[in-house]
Amino acid sequence: MMKEKGFTLAEVLITLGLLGVVIAMTLPALIQQHQKREITVALEKMYTTLMQAANTYQAINEVYITDFDTSLSAKDFMEEYFNPFLNISMVCKDDNDCWYGKRQPKAIDQTTNITIDYGVILGDGRILGVNTLDGVVVFFFDADGPSGFNRSGHDIFNFYLINSRTIGTYKNCEYVMPTLRSGLYPGGYSACYRPFNLYSREDLLGTAIDRSCNKNTRVVMRQAGDACAALIMQDGWEMKKDYPAW
């Protein structure tokens, strides 16, 4: 008679133990990859939403973006040009109100606080903040809402709206001004208002320019690390393996 073959209890337990080790080693990486994908999808969607809002305003009012009055306060600017076309659930009274007094948003260096002049909570729970200065409008987008890491380059990203006709001027920036084009750009800007989409990938990852997507970037004003959105867009709306801010 043939004997039936099977696994002993010890063999089953060893196999289950090995499977547990493999799962424990691979699961965090899979979860992280999923989180990155969720954030980049939300980032691309927000960029599309802001572009559609700007284009809709221009179409309705028969104007171009150079007619946007970027000298307005952040509140007045948003109420005029963007709020009517966004799904807003709440207007924040201040920074703490937007993030419900939870973890204060930080720059990419993880120490410098990010502050906003005006903010709203969108219908999906994500946060859109705005700062205006010298004819420049910078959007701050929290891609996973107040409960996330709240850190620039990780889940907070920038969009930069430039109106080349009304932008201010800085000393020694005259050579840059003629090259600036009005529009909405992922990321913010470095020296002389130059948008980050005009920089190379190497520049965006390095420390040679202000506010690059690098934890050792020079911290200037409130936008430290705001090149990360431009890097993600340049990489096809992905966080590549060498993405530094996760």
Image: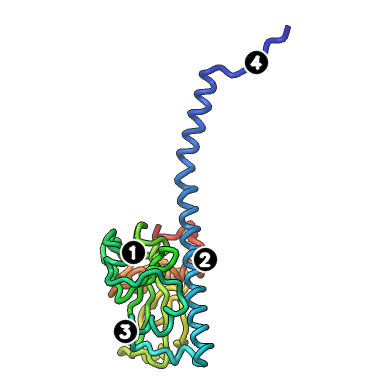
Image position, residue 216 (x, y; %)? 32, 64
Q: Secondary structure at mark 2?
A: loop
- Residue identified by numbered label 2: 237
- Residue identified by numbered label 3: 73
Q: Secondary structure at mark 4?
A: loop
Compared with 3, 155 (above or below) is below
Image position, residue 143 (x, y; %)? 42, 64
- Residue identified by numbered label 1: 108
Camera-side residue of 106 and 204: 106
Distance from Cα at disc 3 to Cα at disc 4:
79 Å
Is residue 101 in sight in this rendering? yes
- Residue identified by numbered label 4: 5
Q: Secondary structure at mark 3?
A: loop
Sequence order check, earlier mark of 1 and 4: 4
Q: Classify residue 211 by image quadrant.
A: bottom left
Q: Classify residue 7 by image quadrant.
A: top right
Residue at x 50% of width, y 30% of height = 18
Sequence order check, earlier mark of 3 and 4: 4
Distance from Cα at disc 2 to Cα at disc 4:
53 Å
Q: Classify residue 208 by image quadrant.
A: bottom left
Sequence order check, earlier mark of 1 and 2: 1
Camera-side residue of 82 and 27: 82
**Are dots 1 and 3 in contact, CB under 8 Å?**
no
Dot 1 crowding, Cα within 10 Å, few <14, some 14–19, many 20+: many
Distance from Cα at disc 1 to Cα at disc 2:
19 Å
Dot 4 crowding, Cα within 10 Å, few <14, some 14–19, many 20+: few
Residue at x 53% of width, y 18% of height = 9
